[in-house]
Image (cartoon, rainbow, N blue to C red):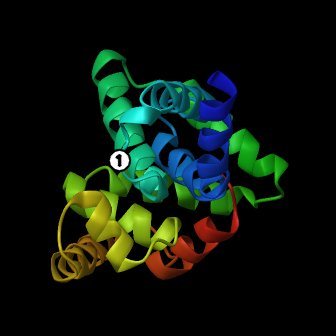
Amino acid sequence: MANTKQDEFMKAYDACHDRFLRYCSSLAYGKMDVQDLVQDVLVSAYHKFEKIENKDQLLHYLIRAARNRSISIWRKQKPQTELTQLHADRLADQGVKPETVLDIQLLYRMLDKLPSKQKDALVLFEINGFSMKEIAEIQGSNEGAIKTKISRGRKKLAALMKDDSSNSVDSLMETLQTITL
């Protein structure tokens, strides 16, 4: 029985591993350790796997669980500057230029100033490459509302970053898509 559950879970998770890891990396940037978040969510999802009705939608379940878990962790802890440095070191190890690392840190600070639904939609769409339809399913919304959130989020983000950076928001989003935080 346990092997069957484990095999089913691993098969379902295998299909979404990369996208889930990328989402957790972008969600946790500067706030918590990515591996801790991923492990917490996966352990929880494994224990509740039988209760998940649509196993093909495991990615959506994992994303909601990661979002909820991260909010819970953020409420309990103080901001930790060493996590930002840890993420910066990981980016540097990947060969990312120091000025790009600074731009990424600025982008995440500005993203934190957006309303949570806009921020989540932008992170899912721009950084993680989810489709509008997938984001709508994850957020329990419709595609039109997601397009609006993304459009308004882009405008607000561009306005926030206008004075703080010479790089455009679009070029930063493209850079983030190519690296793993």
The local secondary structure at tag 1 comes to: loop
Above or below 84: residue 23: below
Quick check: 94 left or right of 117?
right
Quarter occupied by the N terminus: top right
> Within 10 angstroms of label 1, few (less than 14), some, or many (20 or more) residues?
few
Which percent across, then down, holds residue 165?
Answer: 46, 69
Which percent across, then down, holds residue 22?
Answer: 59, 54
Dividing the picture into quadrants, the one containing residue 8 is top right
Q: Residue at x 27, y 69 (%)?
A: 136
Above or below 18: residue 131: below
- Outermost residue toward the front in this view: 1
Above or below 56: residue 82: above
Q: Is residue 85 visible?
A: yes
Task: Name the residue that disc number 1 marks.
Answer: 53
Which percent across, then down, holds residue 94?
Answer: 82, 54
Q: Residue at x 37, y 30 (%)?
A: 69
